[in-house]
Amino acid sequence: MRIPNINQTGVPGAEQISLGAISSAAQAGMRTTQALTKVVDDYQVMSDKAEATAQYGQNYQSSLMALDASYDEMINQPHFDDKNNPTYRDISKRWNTLSLKHVSETLNNFTNKTASAQYQTDISTYLRGKSSDIRGVARTRQVDYANGVLASQILSYSKQPDGAKKIQAAIEQQVQIGFMTPEAGVNELQSSLEDHASTQVTMSIESSTSDTDLDAIRLSLINNTNPYLSLSTVQSAFTSIQQRENQIDKDFDDEQTSTYVDTLTKIVMGDLTNEGEIDLLLLNEKITPAYHAALSQRLVEEIKGPEVDDWAEYSLIKLNVWDYTAADILNNEMLTQGTRIKLLADLAKWNDDEDKDLDWVATQSGREATRQIKAAFPVASKQFNPFGAASAEADNALTKLYERVIALPVGQRTTSVIDIAKEIIADSDKNKNKAVGPVIPATIQEIIKQTKGGSPERKKMIDAWRDKNAIQPSQDDYFRTSQINIMSLAKELGVIV
């Protein structure tokens, strides 16, 4: 049989041999096609896997960085708003809204279904953990806030005579709603009732105005029946009673001395001529018998003084008026009546200025200096602050202000306090400017690894790296980083071992 395109050799079997060759060649061609098809298919699988890995890695890592930053920012926000309301109440809701919005927007970036599915699985696990964490943060802040309110209530109730019942009710409520354990509640109640008993005794002593009042308090302490009034409190109260008695006696003596000086001044100036007024002061215990005798004597024998002042005596008193009392000046026989009255006015003015300078905190300048410092060091609003207490930084600055002002001589404090406050604020600003900056990685590769391409963070860190090392980044640094990334991806895909 003649087969087209096959040479007829005339040799038996030659045609069969040629057919075998053709068949073998055809089978070899099929194997080659199959091999090529498999290569293409394998490449597509690897390409799809690489695409899925790249999309997943980029979006998942980006989400972790963004969500971690948002989480940190949220939990580090002030614990109280500008109206002093706690911000923990909606923190979980705000986190859920923010995180779900981010995930929804990120899913729109996927074109590979496998990568999208894996991202949803892993990011859901991450979000469940973060949601649990933020609920814990909210619970902790809720308990802290409740304890802050309780402390404020106890402080207020401790100053009320019937505050013990209110304190007990407030603590029991905390235990019932679970903000305090029963054991902690018992300890807090014991401590708070002891403080209440001590505060009530202290307040009664401080408000006493006579020895009779203090004697009554002393007797009540001796016959104490309050189980929350400790022995140490009673002992301290007896000491306070003695101090209060001394203060009452001193105040009484000072008042009598002041009345004596006022009356003596009236006699010298001719405004008092009736001895009956002096007798009435003695009858009402406004002056001592000794003061009464001295005033009666002066009333009948008023010292008019010399016709001319003794200049040396006048100069001595004029230049050192703060070393003399009003009585010293009024009874000075070396000065005329008019001069004594003028020196008395000088003494009064000096005493008034001294009082203002000694109490510089209460002056307008002192209040303004305090305001400036509190404004420069505001409260961070991370703790319950119902009474507008100063921040720790402001407390430190106010301490420095007090120490520097009190070291000044009397007469310079009120005029210097604002300037000193400004110096303290300026010194603090200088120290803040010296604060340590961000940590700069040692290599450009580390910077590229830690930051996103084209991001402000990367540019800022590269600029800082350049300034720190005084050299410009090389293109080789970026090329080497790209090579490392490509090799890492190839190893992950199994293309190379």
Image (tube, grey):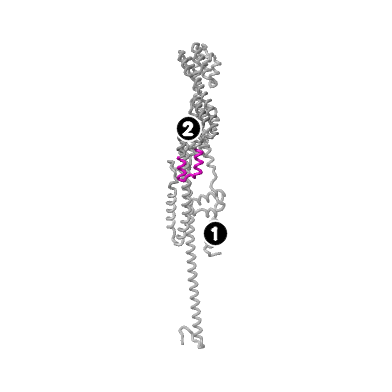
Please give the label number shown on residue 367.
2
Q: Is 282 in front, or is 368?
A: 282
Left or right, 89 with respect to 245, comes to: left
Residue at (49% x, 44% y) in the render:
182
Residue 360 horizontal/vertical position (percent): 50, 29
The span picked out in magenta is 169-192
Q: Is 117 in front, or is 188?
A: 188
Instruction: Examine the residues drawn in magenta and state their main secondary structure.
Output: helix
Whether 94 is drawn above or below 368: the answer is below
Whether 74 is drawn above or below 350: the answer is below
Nearer-N-terminus badge (2/1): 2
Please give the label number shown on residue 484.
1
Secondary structure found at label 1: helix
Q: Nearer the viewer, mark 2 or mark 1?
A: 2
Q: Amino acid at mark 1?
A: Ile
Residue 103 horizontal/vertical position (percent): 44, 55
Badge 2, how many Cα within 10 Å: few under 14, some, many 20+? some
Residue 373 horizontal/vertical position (percent): 49, 36
Any part of residue 428 in sight? yes
**From mark 2 to mark 1, how far is it between C-alphas?**
64 Å
Question: Does residue 186 show up magenta in the picture?
Answer: yes
Please give the label number shown on residue 25.
none
Question: Does residue 121 show up magenta in the picture?
Answer: no
Residue 276 horizontal/vertical position (percent): 45, 14
